[in-house]
């Protein structure tokens, strides 16, 4: 087994349970899911930053600022 296939099996969830030819499909699926997560987290981060930047912080409302 090549070093790269062993590394993929280690990195991809469920990679040890599939044959090498299916491992590439599982890897592609995993990459798509990771990209979707990154996009979601980026959007959430931007939303939180915009909310915090545009509004009052909780500390300011309590008179602590």
Image: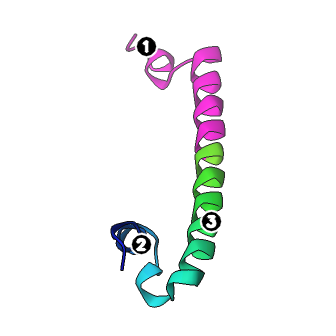
Q: Which residue is mark 3?
A: 28
Residue ID at (33%, 68%):
3
Q: CA distance from mark 1 to mark 3?
A: 52 Å
Seen from the viewer's position, the closer of residues 54 and 37 is 37
Q: Which residues are magenta?
A: 41-65
Which is more foreground, mark 2 or mark 1? Answer: 2
Q: Please tell me whether residue 46 is drawn above or below residue 56 in the rendered image.
A: below
Seen from the viewer's position, the closer of residues 6 and 40 is 6
Q: Earlier in the sequence, mark 2 or mark 1?
A: 2
Seen from the viewer's position, the closer of residues 50 and 59 is 50
**Residue 30 at x, y = what percent?**
58, 66
Seen from the viewer's position, the closer of residues 16 and 5 is 5
Looking at the rendered structure, which numbered label has been put on residue 63?
A: 1
Q: Callout 2: helix, strand or loop? A: helix
Q: CA distance from mark 2 to mark 1?
A: 58 Å
User: Are the residues at dot 1 and dot 3 in contact (C-beta closer than 8 Å)?
Assistant: no
Residue 53 lies in the magenta-colored region: yes
Q: Please tell me whether residue 63 is drawn above or below residue 40 in the rendered image.
A: above
Instruction: Tell me if mark 1 has few (under 14), some (14-19) or many (20+) residues whose alpha carbon lies within 10 angstroms of its own.
Output: few
Q: Which residue is mark 2?
A: 5
Instruction: Tell me if mark 3 has few (under 14), some (14-19) or many (20+) residues whose alpha carbon lies within 10 angstroms of its own.
Output: few
């Amino acid at each position: 087994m090549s070093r790269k296939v062993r590394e993929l099996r280690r990195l991809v969830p469920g990679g040890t349970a599939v044959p090498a030819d299916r491992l590439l499909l599982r890897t592609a699926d995993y990459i798509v899911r990771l990209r979707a997560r990154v996009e979601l987290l980026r959007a959430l981060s931007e939303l939180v930053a915009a909310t915090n930047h545009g509004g009052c912080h909780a500390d300011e409302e309590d008179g602590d600022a």
